[in-house]
Amino acid sequence: MNIRSMAAVLAATVMLPLGAAHATDLEVTHWWTSGGEAAAVAELAKAFNATGNKWVDGAIAGSGGTARPIMISRITGGDPMAATQFNHGRQAEELVQAGLMRDFTDLAKKEGWDKIVRPAGLLKSCTFEGKIYCVPLNIHSWQWLWLSNDAFKKAGVAVPKNWDEYVAAAPALEKAGIVPLAVGGQAWQSTGLFAVLTVAIGGKDIYQKVYGDKDAKVAAGPEMAKVFKAADDARKMAKGTNVQDWNQATNMVITGKAGGQIMGDWAQGEFQLAGKKAGVDYTCLPGLGVNEVISTAGDAFYFPVLKDAAKTKAQEALASSLLDAKTQVAFNLKKGSLPVRGDVDLAAANDCMKKGLEILAKGNVVTSTDQLITQDTQKQLEDLMSQFFANTSITAEEAQKRFVAIFSKAG
């Protein structure tokens, strides 16, 4: 991916007037716009505003795929925001290489980030040539199946305990007028779903060999053929979803219009906002109830190089506030994610978050695709999966051949 060749889609930015003396306004861009996400962002803003500065919200609707090109275009075009969200991994790699992002190594050493951030791989993802360029904020895992207890009750079948039971229950759900599996129309959703199936059906080793080692032979093998069979089941179950955004698909589960959704743990924020209780109104199955693992995906904040000295100083206050123990708890409880700090009190966590914490404590983790593959490979996979889920004439065998071709030259 050549970031300098991206179309310049500039977002208009209105800076608010300065308030109290010495306070500095910082525009912060992100793509958290659903109800649950907005509630979580408010906690970050509250923590930063308590430093005497002001968070100027620069939310960009339309998910990361829409927001990232806008963010990158502004930074490379000379109109940088003060801070911006990216996912853990390689999304900001070229911006760092181009010298457009701030080096936070001194602050990280001063505050001992290496002692509080876990898994250590999250801080490693922020590191380039020995220097730290971002602040890990949370741990988001894609490895979840969210089920509507009411939907299965209406269909007259027990709430599934694993993927196979879920597939077997699909006909009963359809007979009751319920979409078995809600999958939004955006390409990143079906691509993420497929990676979850790879871990659950293929196993951790297969996942690592394909996404991590780029082993085309394994990608072409019988274990991945099983994954593509499961993906074929998934697209059949998803027929009739007819929504685009992930939170719209989540709402189908919340309202009992869909039996379930494979989605990251950010979906918990939507259940919480709707007043739904884990274990009562909905059921969560990490690793689809097959391989209970957590992927170390999530979000980090990067800070573009600025000419304004006051804003540059305020960037450090923002960075510190993001890793503050109280901020970590307040934000992640509302976001549905896990904190990157291992020393915080999460007694208020719900049943699903506690499951995630237990899995994390056991070390049952896989590295997220964001950290393993380039943005170019990600785009190719999104093209493949969006076509596969939209066009049932593409067989699982044909899709696997195209998948192998991608990984035979993946970086």
Image: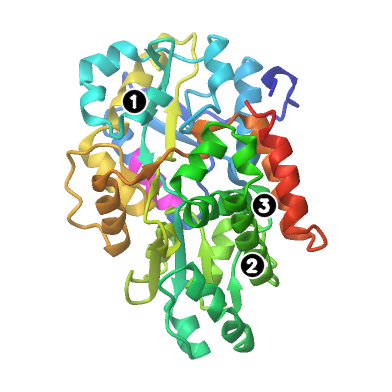
Q: Splitting the image into 4 quarters, where does residue 257 fall?
A: bottom right
Which residue position is annotated with label 1?
319
Total marks drawn? Answer: 3
Marks 3 & 1, CB-CB < 8 Å contact: no
- Tell which tag, 3 or 2, sits nearer the viewer: 2
Which residue position is annotated with label 3?
186
Q: Decide if residue 131 is on the left or right side of residue 170.
A: left
Q: Which residues are magenta?
A: 37-44
Q: Position of residue 142 (x, y in %)?
A: 47, 50
Q: Decide if residue 368 is on the left or right side of residue 385.
A: left
Q: Amino acid at mark 1?
A: Ala
* Magenta stretch, main secondary structure class: helix
Q: Quadrant of the C terminus?
A: top right
Which residue position is annotated with label 2?
233
Mark on residue 252?
none
- Tell which tag, 1 or 2, sits nearer the viewer: 2
Q: Is residue 40 shown in magenta?
A: yes
Task: Tell me if residue 66 can be seen.
Answer: yes
Q: Decide if residue 274 is on the left or right side of residue 79.
A: left
Tell which circle, 3 or 1, labels the residue nearer the N-terminal end. Answer: 3
Mark 3, Cα crowd under 10 Å, few <14 / some 14-19 / many 20+, is some
Q: Decide if residue 346 is on the left or right side of residue 126.
A: left
- What is the secondary structure assignment of the residue under circle 2? helix
- What is the secondary structure assignment of the residue under circle 3? loop
Seen at 70% across and 50% down, the residue is: 385
Q: Position of residue 262 (x, y in %)?
A: 52, 60
Marks 1 & 2, CB-CB < 8 Å contact: no
Q: Position of residue 408 (x, y in %)?
A: 69, 32
Q: Is residue 16 shown in magenta?
A: no
**Marks 3 and 1, how far apart at CA:** 31 Å
> In front: 370, or 311?
370
Tell which circle, 3 or 2, labels the residue nearer the N-terminal end. Answer: 3
